[in-house]
Image (cartoon, rainbow, N blue to C red):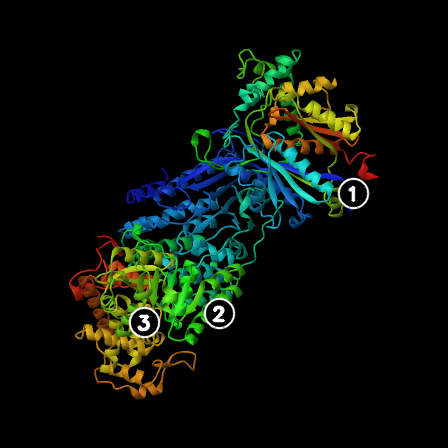
């Protein structure tokens, strides 16, 4: 048994639940008499909805397949070898479930080394090797092909990426070392860093070819046949593959610098993966691949044992799994069909909601408001947005016609809502107004209609309390910008029944939103945490800490934007309003900042001016600020803010606002854009010991979003 | 409106290698529509001067138009092959003569002026769609004795043909079959067949059928080179006790697809497309269903009469070898020797296989290659027998011949 086999055997024992990928070796005669060829097919035996992955046993299987082909190559029995995937899937990389189980640095190192040891054999097999990227290829799937002498790609390939940095890893089976040496450092930085940090952007087959990752591009209908015919021509010398010379000069440094700039702007130094990847890319300039592989092994092991990756995988699973099967949602079968939607209000928010419902549900959507002008403006907005989609080619003329015909506006609710199954209100954030609106709707809408409120801070139960059928009211809290942020907090009022709630979840699913069930608690989840977070920042500023220090204190978290930039985005008036609401509910923890009040009263849209292109304190705001004389350090600010957040989440879980800490994290990731490397926030609070310090216990058991004990 | 009938030519034809139907066959896990799509794409690749948007029709034949052979496969295959959506398509069925009928039908439309160029082909995946799948014969066939009960079973109709011509013995049929295998092997050795095959990638997940994973099919699976008379003599006669028809002197159950380009001669020449054969005449004829193998004879009579030719004018024959007896009946009728060099020079369906509705174009592709090699031959003929008692014949002119119409 070779040492690689031993290494993998040991690793496989740590991961008994692996979905094992087979590496089938099949022989064929290449067209045109080019000779006998060994083709390896990676296949986990499941259909395309269960993509092929690499765990240790899968790597061992590939290793055994390579043993066989290597022997045949040495005997002259084959003139070349290829590797491809099952239908629609090439391979999507390492099995993350196995990574989560790893407890020791040496085991993590074995995974990296095991992959390298197997894959790199494809570059020295004694005969040329070919990778045929027939379908989705990610991470280790991409990398196994990079070790081959040649690559082809299908123009039908929908997704190709090195997503490791997105999750908190580095492409550690050859990606960091080989890719810059194949396509140049700048393009490698685009694939490894830029795409990954851009919400894991995927490449299509054509781009894989244009970037030079694949040497030839063939259409999906006969991709493998044409790849094999091309292979025959390459082996016979009829086709000579020419790749552009790699610029190893200044361009390399510039590329790495560009990568660092991208990483800084996305994670602000808070997550190590991108920087580790860039270090390896930088060092790969000398073309010494083995040195690069060793560096990948070390980086991979370090990162696997680090909290950021564990948080990243946790966050990924929340979004991919929990986000699609919301905790606590009633049985789907209880949902009632929604064939017409009413929207009360025709303002900007209401119009955006109308557009969203229209596009996703493709049912009639009726807007109402208090005068014809507002109604016309709302419908006009939706029509204009449809035109924009048409102009961009996102929809065709027929679809545009269909959507436009589906949206109407009326003044008379009786006319508009008599046959609506789902009515959402987006009127002024004032309890009496909303109660009045729902009473009017109830007078005309069918008995089964669900009423949804987009309130961000009012009590759903109170809003429903005056209705004859309060059980039909649910909270349906979107996040701005509605078209961008996936989160939808679905609020169950005291009297909300299962059928209405199930209908709300069914609608959310059709809207392609990440729905999280919350109790009817003040400001629900995201706004409550953000308001506590912002309130604490505001407090330290009010007490005397300079704005810059308070802002800088938060930078190491790597949040998408600083607290005061966020305030600007939300709008100081809304921020103030929510803080007042929460102050009424929990006066002992939520303050109303006099300085914020002053800023709002002065009609300011934020603390900053952006004239220079970057945020600078607005002198007019500076003049308004009345600060105390207690000046904290960055560390002190950070501790105070995070303690407050940990306390608030702890209380929310005690109150049962959401089912579990996982829901809090899912909300922060999808509603506030909080980063994967924090896992939302509770994994970070756990790993920094903040949860323990504040609440006396962790939010998540050890092993969840952290290295198992 | 005055009309002029236009000359119709066979521009090019390709096929997939043929496979054996069944769980161990090379195409067992390959869809029928994918097979014909690969053939169409190869046809387009080989004729880059043809703008696919100019194709006026895609006519694809299949006998069992169910599942992956259903859904108007001529249309769906066109879309799957990447033809522009503006190119229409339809399906055709005349059982074994499906592809042949696809050719003659589009040829008629070309001659009429409705089309300039069309794709015509066929597919049959007899592994996924065994003969008789989903059939529901009208009970009147039996109750009113409209046809003999054996008419539904092609092997039985072949035995019936032996009964009709007692001088066509099992020995003669076996000898014919051995020659077919020999000729096919020789044609392969000379590279005559491979040039019109499109390689097909095939997946196998069942280890009992052989190596698993993706493979590539580049040759016909059914061929049995080296077959001897002794090999054949011991075979069972599954259609009748002490019968004469065996798996050795008949075509097997097969999977495969073919595609051809049929155009007006003017269009082909204007667009620099090859002119491999010129259509002279075509004809179909019905016979008693229980001796369907007799069908090629009356069909050929009609086609010759239409063309004003006699059998002596025909220099090359491509006769589909559904059964050796049916070829021998044809040869006997015209007084042609069993081993006449003009007949099935590359061997026939006994060696290559006969995926029902696809076979017609294979005959044409082979005849076209023989025309190229033998410019001294002016006329050739493709003919086949068809289930439920029919025959189909197409007569072609060799454009390479010095007196050929197109060279005037």
Residue designated by label 2: A384
Establish if A11 lies above or below A193: above
Percent coordinates x, y for residue A437 in the rendering: 31, 70
Depth order, front residue of B320/B214: B320
Q: Mark 3 — on which chain does it sit? A: A
User: Judging from the image, what secondary structure is the residue with disc 3 in?
Assistant: helix
Residue designated by label 1: B4
Horizontal relation, residue B278 to residue A444: left or right: right
User: Judging from the image, what secondary structure is the residue with disc 2 in?
Assistant: helix
| Marks 1 and 2 on same chain | no
C-alpha gap between disc 3 and disc 2:
39 Å
Q: Is residue A263 visible in this depiction of the protein?
A: no
Depth order, front residue of A364/B327: A364
Q: Mark 2 — on which chain does it sit? A: A
Q: Residues within 10 Å of mark 1 (few under 14, many from 20)?
A: few
Q: Mark 1 — on which chain does it sit? A: B
Mark 3 against mark 2, which lies toward the viewer? 2
Establish if A87 lies above or below A466: above
Which circle's residue, 3 or 2, is located before the other in the chain? 2
């Amino acid at each position: 048994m070779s040492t690689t086999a031993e290494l993998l055997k040991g690793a496989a024992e740590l991961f008994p639940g692996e979905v094992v990928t087979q590496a089938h070796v099949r022989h064929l005669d290449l067209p045109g008499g080019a000779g006998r060829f060994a083709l390896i097919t990676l296949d986990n035996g499941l259909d395309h909805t269960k993509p092929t992955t690499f765990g240790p046993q899968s790597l061992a299987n590939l290793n055994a397949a390579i043993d066989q082909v290597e022997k045949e190559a040495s005997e002259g029995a084959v003139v070349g070898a290829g590797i491809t995937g099952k239908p629609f899937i090439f391979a999507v990389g390492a099995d993350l479930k196995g990574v989560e189980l790893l407890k020791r640095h040496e085991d993590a190192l074995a995974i990296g080394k095991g992959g390298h040891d197997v894959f790199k054999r494809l570059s020295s097999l004694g005969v040329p090797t070919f990778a045929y990227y027939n379908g989705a290829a990610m991470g280790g799937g991409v990398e196994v092909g990079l070790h081959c002498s040649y690559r082809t790609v299908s123009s039908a390939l929908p997704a190709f990426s090195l997503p490791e940095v997105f999750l908190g890893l580095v492409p550690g089976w050859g990606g960091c070392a080989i890719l810059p040496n194949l396509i140049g450092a700048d393009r490698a930085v685009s694939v490894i860093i830029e795409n990954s940090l851009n919400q894991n952007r995927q490449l299509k087959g054509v781009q894989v070819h244009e970037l030079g990752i694949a040497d030839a591009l063939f259409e999906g209908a006969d991709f493998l046949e044409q790849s094999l015919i091309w292979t025959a021509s390459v082996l016979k010398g009829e086709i000579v593959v020419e790749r552009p010379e790699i610029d190893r000069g200044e361009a390399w440094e510039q590329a790495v610098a560009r990568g660092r700039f991208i990483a800084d702007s996305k994670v602000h130094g808070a997550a190590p993966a991108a920087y580790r990847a860039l270090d390896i890319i930088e060092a790969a300039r000398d073309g010494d691949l083995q040195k690069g592989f060793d560096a990948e092994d070390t980086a991979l092991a370090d990162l696997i044992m680090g909290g950021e990756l564990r948080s990243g995988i946790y966050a990924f699973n929340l979004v991919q799994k929990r986000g699609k099967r919301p905790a606590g949602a009633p049985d789907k079968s209880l949902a009632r069909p929604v064939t017409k939607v009413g929207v009360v209000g025709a303002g900007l928010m209401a119009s955006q909601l109308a557009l969203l419902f229209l596009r996703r549900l493709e049912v009639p959507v009726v807007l109402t408001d208090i005068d014809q002008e507002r109604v016309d403006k709302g419908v006009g907005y939706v029509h204009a947005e449809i035109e924009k989609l048409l102009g961009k080619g996102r929809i065709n003329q027929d679809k545009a016609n269909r959507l436009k015909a589906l949206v109407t506006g009326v003044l008379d609710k009786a006319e508009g809502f008599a046959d609506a199954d789902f009515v959402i209100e987006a009127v002024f954030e004032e309890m009496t107004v909303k109660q009045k609106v729902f009473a009017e709707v109830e007078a005309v809408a069918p008995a089964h209609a669900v009423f949804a409120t987009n309130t961000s801070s009012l009590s759903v139960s109170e809003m429903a309390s005056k209705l004859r059928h309060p059980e039909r009211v649910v909270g349906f809290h979107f996040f701005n910008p509605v078209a961008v942020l996936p989160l939808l907090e679905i609020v169950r009022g005291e009297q909300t029944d299962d059928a209405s709630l199930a209908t709300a979840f069914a609608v959310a699913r059709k809207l392609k939103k990440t729905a999280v069930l919350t109790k009817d608690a003040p400001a629900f989840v995201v706004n409550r945490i953000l308001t506590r977070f912002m309130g604490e920042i505001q407090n330290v500023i009010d007490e005397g800490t300079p704005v810059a220090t308070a802002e800088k204190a938060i930078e190491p978290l790597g949040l998408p934007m600083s607290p005061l930039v966020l305030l600007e985005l939300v709008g100081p008036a809304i921020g103030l309003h929510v803080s007042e609401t929460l102050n009424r509910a929990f006066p002992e923890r939520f303050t109303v900042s006099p300085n914020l009040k002053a800023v709002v009263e002065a009609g300011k849209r934020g603390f900053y001016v952006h004239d220079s292109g970057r945020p600078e304190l607005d002198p007019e705001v500076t003049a308004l600020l009345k600060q105390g004389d207690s000046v904290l350090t960055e560390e002190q600010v950070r501790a105070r803010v995070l303690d407050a957040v940990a306390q608030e989440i702890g209380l929310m879980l005690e109150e049962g606002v959401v089912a579990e800490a996982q829901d809090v994290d899912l909300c922060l990731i999808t509603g506030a854009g909080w980063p994967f490397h924090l896992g939302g926030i509770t994994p970070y609070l756990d790993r920094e010991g903040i949860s323990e310090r504040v609440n006396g216990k962790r939010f998540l058991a050890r092993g969840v979003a952290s290295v198992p004990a | 409106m005055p009309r002029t009938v236009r000359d119709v030519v066979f521009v090019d034809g390709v096929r997939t290698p043929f496979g054996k139907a069944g769980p161990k066959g090379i195409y067992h896990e390959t869809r029928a529509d994918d097979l014909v799509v690969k053939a169409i794409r190869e046809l387009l690749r080989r004729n880059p001067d043809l703008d696919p948007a100019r194709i006026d029709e895609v006519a694809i034949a299949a006998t069992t138009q169910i599942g992956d052979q259903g859904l108007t496969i001529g249309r769906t295959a066109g879309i799957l092959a990447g033809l522009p959506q503006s190119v229409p398509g339809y399906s055709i069925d005349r059982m074994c003569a499906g592809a042949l009928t696809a050719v003659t039908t589009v040829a008629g439309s070309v001659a009429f002026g409705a089309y300039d160029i069309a794709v015509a082909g066929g597919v049959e995946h007899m592994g996924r769609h065994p003969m008789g799948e989903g059939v529901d014969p009208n009970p009147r066939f039996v109750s009113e004795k409209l046809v003999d009960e054996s008419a539904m079973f092609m092997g039985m109709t072949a035995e019936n043909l032996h009964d009709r011509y007692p001088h066509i013995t099992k020995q003669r049929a076996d000898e014919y079959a051995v020659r077919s295998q020999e000729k096919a092997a020789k044609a392969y050795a000379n590279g005559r067949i491979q040039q019109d095959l499109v390689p097909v990638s095939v997946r196998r997940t069942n280890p009992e059928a052989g190596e698993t994973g993706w493979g590539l099919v580049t040759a016909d699976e059914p061929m049995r080179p080296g077959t001897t008379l002794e090999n054949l003599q011991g075979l069972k006669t599954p259609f009748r006790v002490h019968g004469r028809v065996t798996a050795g002197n008949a075509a097997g159950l097969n999977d495969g697809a073919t595609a051809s380009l049929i155009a007006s001669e003017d269009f082909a020449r204007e667009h620099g497309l090859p002119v491999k054969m010129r259509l002279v005449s075509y004809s179909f004829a019905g016979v008693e269903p229980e001796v369907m193998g007799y069908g090629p004879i009356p069909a050929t009579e009609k086609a010759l009469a239409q063309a004003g030719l006699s059998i002596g004018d025909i220099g090359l024959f491509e006769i589909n070898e559904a059964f050796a007896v049916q070829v021998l009946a044809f040869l006997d009728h015209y007084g042609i020797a069993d081993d006449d060099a003009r007949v099935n020079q590359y061997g026939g369906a006994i060696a290559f296989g006969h995926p029902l509705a696809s076979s017609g174009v294979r005959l044409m592709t082979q005849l076209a290659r023989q025309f190229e090699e033998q410019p001294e031959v002016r006329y050739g003929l493709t003919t086949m027998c068809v289930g439920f008692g029919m025959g189909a014949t197409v007569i072609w002119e060799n454009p390479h011949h010095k007196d050929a119409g197109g060279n005037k």
